[in-house]
Image (spheres, rainbow, N blue to C red):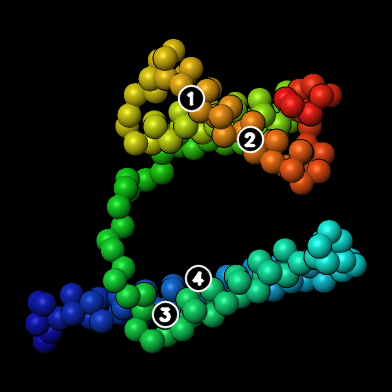
Amino acid sequence: MKHPAQPDADLAATAPRDAQRHQTLIGAAALVLAGLLAWGAAGIPGQSGYAGVGPNFLPWLVSGVLALCGLLLIFEARTGGWRNLEAPSGAARGDWPALAWVAAGIAANASLLDVLGFPLSCTLCFMLAVRGLRMAEGKPHGGGRGLLIDAVTGLLIATPTFWLFTLGLGLNLPGLTKTGWL
């Protein structure tokens, strides 16, 4: 006859093995993703461009770093599991309305990039995403004043980024005007 505490002991013994298996699968998924990125990078021509770096340099770099991370994750999982892992925080379920705000920001940015230009479409994305993130934390959205602060903050982030890419690096990002300043 089993002792009443024994089923809990069996469950406790299988929990580390399950965690180890799940952690190993995460590392393996990172390796698979690295392989897919490397496969895509192999199809990009490698002729040198600006400063001797070709267009396939960054995809190869990302796939190599991701493969290294996958190997390290697997090593950690197989040698005792991820160490000093904190207990999960946050809600037990996803916050779907907050996710909808963030997704709307990303979708608006992608669809309005050519219409509004990079700075304004990224500002709109920032405003919608911040509203969703505040909602997820249970904070108020800030009303009209908060909306204005979010718009100014988004514009202060997006405009220098636009200038860096268009004026500094010579890349053609869509702007609101043809002058290259907005």
For disc 4, the marked residue is 26
Q: Nearer the viewer, residue 12 or 61?
A: 61
In the image, taking residue 17 as reference, residue 68 lies left or right, namely right
Vertical placement of 126 versus 24: above or below? above
Residue type pointed to by label 2: Pro
Comparing marks 3 and 1, which lies closer to the viewer?
1
- Residue plotted at (39% across, 32% down): 134
Q: Measure how far apart labels 1 and 2 are at the Cα level.
A: 16 Å
In the image, taking residue 94 as reference, residue 90 lies left or right, namely left
The answer to whether mark 3 and mark 4 are in CB contact below 8 A is yes
Q: Measure how far apart labels 4 and 1 are at the Cα level.
A: 36 Å
Residue 69 placement: quadrant: bottom right
In x, y percent, where is residue 162?
69, 36
Q: Measure how far apart labels 3 and 4 are at the Cα level.
A: 9 Å
Q: Measure how far apart labels 4 and 2 are at the Cα level.
A: 37 Å
In the image, taking residue 110 as reference, residue 134 lies left or right, namely left
